Amino acid sequence: MKIVKIDMGNLSVNEEAESKYKRLGGRAITSKIIHDEVMATCHPLGAENKLIFATGLLTGSGASSADRYSVGAKSPLTGGIKESNAGGISGLMLGKLGIKALVFSNVREDFKIIHISKSGVKFVDATPILGKDLSVASNWLRDTYGKHVAVWLIGVAGEQKMNLAAIAGQDKDGDPTRFNGRGGLGAVAGSKGIKAIVLDASDVKKNRPSNKESFRKALKQYHSWLMETPGTAKILPELGTASLVETTNTLGALPTRNFSTGAIEGYKNITGETLRETIIERGGEGSTTHACMPGCIIRCSNVYADKSGKRITGPIEYENIGLLGSNLDITNLDEIAELNHLCNELGIDTIETGGALGVLMAQNVISFGDAKGAVSALKEIKNGTPLGRIIGSGAEVIGKLYGEPHVPTVKGQTMPAYDPRAVKGLGVTFATSPMGADHTAGQTVRAQINHHSPEGQVEVSKKAQTVNTIWDNLGMCMFSSGAVQNRWDILAELISAYTGEVYSGEDIVNTANETLKVEHAFNRRAGFTKAHDKLPDYFYVEENKASKTVFDVPQYEVDTIGVNRNDL
Amino acid sequence: MKIVKIDMGNLSVNEEAESKYKRLGGRAITSKIIHDEVMATCHPLGAENKLIFATGLLTGSGASSADRYSVGAKSPLTGGIKESNAGGISGLMLGKLGIKALVFSNVREDFKIIHISKSGVKFVDATPILGKDLSVASNWLRDTYGKHVAVWLIGVAGEQKMNLAAIAGQDKDGDPTRFNGRGGLGAVAGSKGIKAIVLDASDVKKNRPSNKESFRKALKQYHSWLMETPGTAKILPELGTASLVETTNTLGALPTRNFSTGAIEGYKNITGETLRETIIERGGEGSTTHACMPGCIIRCSNVYADKSGKRITGPIEYENIGLLGSNLDITNLDEIAELNHLCNELGIDTIETGGALGVLMAQNVISFGDAKGAVSALKEIKNGTPLGRIIGSGAEVIGKLYGEPHVPTVKGQTMPAYDPRAVKGLGVTFATSPMGADHTAGQTVRAQINHHSPEGQVEVSKKAQTVNTIWDNLGMCMFSSGAVQNRWDILAELISAYTGEVYSGEDIVNTANETLKVEHAFNRRAGFTKAHDKLPDYFYVEENKASKTVFDVPQYEVDTIGVNRNDL
């Protein structure tokens, strides 16, 4: 496979052999390139930053839940290194084209569509799709370039280089609903004039495993685990990630009214069960289960329809219910769906948007529970009005604008839907991950531990950070990790058989830890210290009334796995 | 003298002996208290931060230009330690009351007037003066408490905890025109519910020098230097700080159109000479020279009147001409005066405001040169509209909102009116001072050096940083430093004779360096590293067309006097 380097300043293209990235995939590649090639103190929206798309080691192999890809850059939201991955088919298509990583450098003022096919890279003026809703732009691209292409694109928020701008990829049905949401990577794309990337793998041969027999055997084992584990076999396919609402509300971890408490009165209206019942009852275009990637066994996604059965949005995820729902004192699925839909059309991260609206509600700029007010405010993003710009800057910046100390962010990034006082392992992850507050950087909510106790949380987070990094490197969905249960050897067999390179279970773990190491090293150069490895003050002193806890994991323990961790 | 500690949460007052602060003054005190008592990672607007007012060692002594006082806190603008000092009579009055430092802790929601007199501290509801123009609030205070009091107060920006909110003190004529402008200290006051401080020194005996004879002798020497040095004897009294416009425009250092170049076409309209001629020609309430502190020999201040001779504002300083004038493509003194006036009434830092408007103009939210647009935008600060909040957040945050990499800030604070590509010593100061971009932290523009050359600038800045810190500790105006010329022994004699403590010239220098040391130590704990000791990227790569230079002082040299400096 190859590395394709595109200078967006002069629109030149260079292809290189994968050489030193041969044994790496996904996040391991994006983070290594950023570490090696990006000046850590550079302005994230300036010419020195790079934006990298990389396929996972198993992307395209046909293994379930393994077609994810990573996007990386220095983040305008956190000021540190960032990787954000997503499913769907766009990463898969990049892999089919034989491209292991796509590296964009430099900046430009106007916007281009970058068309990549067997015959090379073409740059097309993006004017026809500027300022449009994401679905409109995506349809235009597929009408123009054919239904067989896969696309990545940014929305109006990315065009305006807003901190909460995402990059959207396409699911197997052609909908641009798979997001590299976190860290403002859409703004980095916007700064480089990348409106869309069209991937056309026509006349390209399918990738085949290097050792078919061995691959088939390992795959069988892996799939059987997925099919016999309750989470991946039943809970996620039936209820989706929304199955967590009941759990976190009970724990007192469901962010409520700008993370002021962890349980909400009307939570029954927004559980996974209610979501499922509502979708089934309404029928029509709705669906309780949906695979974003072809062949995915887990199929945790869904399509939410209105009362007449017409699709409003998809998927409604746990994080969206938490951030756009309870965090805003909204417990009505239709209202959450409308906000979710709007975020998708604007091309913005739902978590960061929920964080931003939460702080604005704490400041009474919009009232808690006022979904109409939230919708109307969000719409201002399109034209970049002052309020639109304010929302677009994310929760941390809004806190600075309004002098509000209650801002649920770490390293500038909004916490996903877990109050860290009630799921303390995630609190440790939020504090110490090189990514800022991010549950996918070290998810502990399913760990067998007393989530309210400070004990053992650092160890749990540390392990989870390694596991999540392994998954990010392989291009696998983190939801399969519960079924694999640290049995790395089967993963090693899968990769070895697929790529033809020999990997051991130990190699996989070591590469993940090496990835974390280069990420922390980059962040240190960018100016991060252990002073940044902490939660906002109020989590330590103001009790979460639902869980009756504060965050009390000792900082000296937290610091052992933060920016200065030396065990890697 | 004593230290008065006020907990704004429960409105309790504690008095302590000055003990370990006995030999310190001004910035040395504020920075030591912050270093010793404030958790470096705390939220600047939270209960953990402290706001400290401290008199200089010579404040109240009767020495010319020596009645300044320092205000310090962790800054909401920079996230680091901050000291900002000002002249006028409020610091003098604090000293008369026998108070060396006034230390505010905790936070509160409502606003108080804190009345301090011989009989103690009283807290009064501030509702009658909330939301008012600063001059209205100040007059109300003096009408209510008597013309003999001195006041400190914040404006509507401080009430709303905006990053560019200043604290205003009063000049010898009762006007609240002396500002602790930088670093958002007005927002810290706002977070603590401090609307105003009224200082009533009735029935308090005047401070007398401990050794009159020796003091008189040293004072005579010091004053004779002030009266025989051209800068302090002639240039500053005649032209004020605006005398610099001609110099910096010639150097290519006058910030123009959001620091994109360093000279402006119509600069002749905004020079110190033009300012003086205009004031003289108009007569009436205008004055070309004005002492902010009683007995000041330098009298660099002025009062600017309109065509009918009615006072518009005062003083118009060089920094205001640079930031509210050329930086916004405005070369009309009446327009600058109006903006200046508005900043004063809102209680905001003119430098940060000019930086904020400059970035908004670079983004075409307001057009360059559009003074009316700027005035109308500034007025939105009063009601905290989205645009008002945006301006109130300062240039750095606005850059994040609009995805603009051309933002002339260091550590979040707007550069004063010197393009660092053309006065490179100041570039070094901006990059390395614990205060962020601040000319008063190490002014080099009057140094005998080729300002365009990278050579020798680190040494010049290093010396200037020590000198400025000495002046800040003594409560002296930095404009006298050119006349004193490092002859520390006379300063030591002055302080020794005034305070009764024995100081050598070496002591003075050592204390200043110790102050810098604790400031850098605090900033390291707050998370600053050498990654923060740099200018924005574009100053290194985009040429200032007026000076034909980029900033090219080698970073390894710059780093020797930054956050990790080990020579202190």
Image: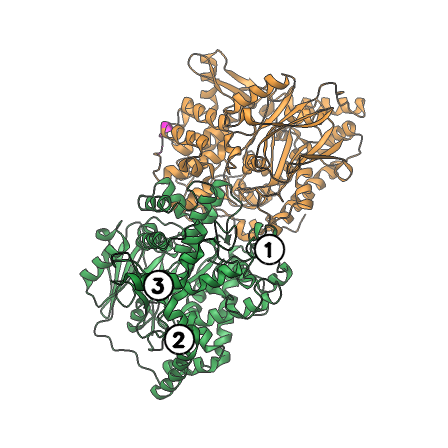
Chain colours: A orange, B green
Report the chain holding disc 2: B
**Element marked by disc 2:** helix
For the residues beneath circles 1 and 2, the answer to whether they share a chain is yes
What is the CA distance from the residue labelled 1 to the residue labelled 3? 35 Å
Task: Return the x and y of residue B195 as percentages of the image width and height.
Answer: 29, 55
Residue bearing mark 1:
B550
* Discs 2/3, front: 3
- What separation in Å lies between label 2 and label 3 (alpha carbons)? 19 Å
Q: Chain of mark 3?
A: B
Residue A472 in picture, x, y percent from top left: 65, 34
Give the spatial CA distance, label 1 vs label 2. Answer: 35 Å
In front here: B397 or B525?
Answer: B397
- Kindly identify which residue carries mark 3: B277
Asked which quadrant contains residue A54, the reply is top right
A369 is within the stretch colored magenta: yes
Q: Quadrant of residue A487?
A: top right
Q: Which residue is mark 2?
A: B233
Is A517 included in the stretch rendered in magenta? no
Q: Residue at x 62, y 16 (%)?
A: A147
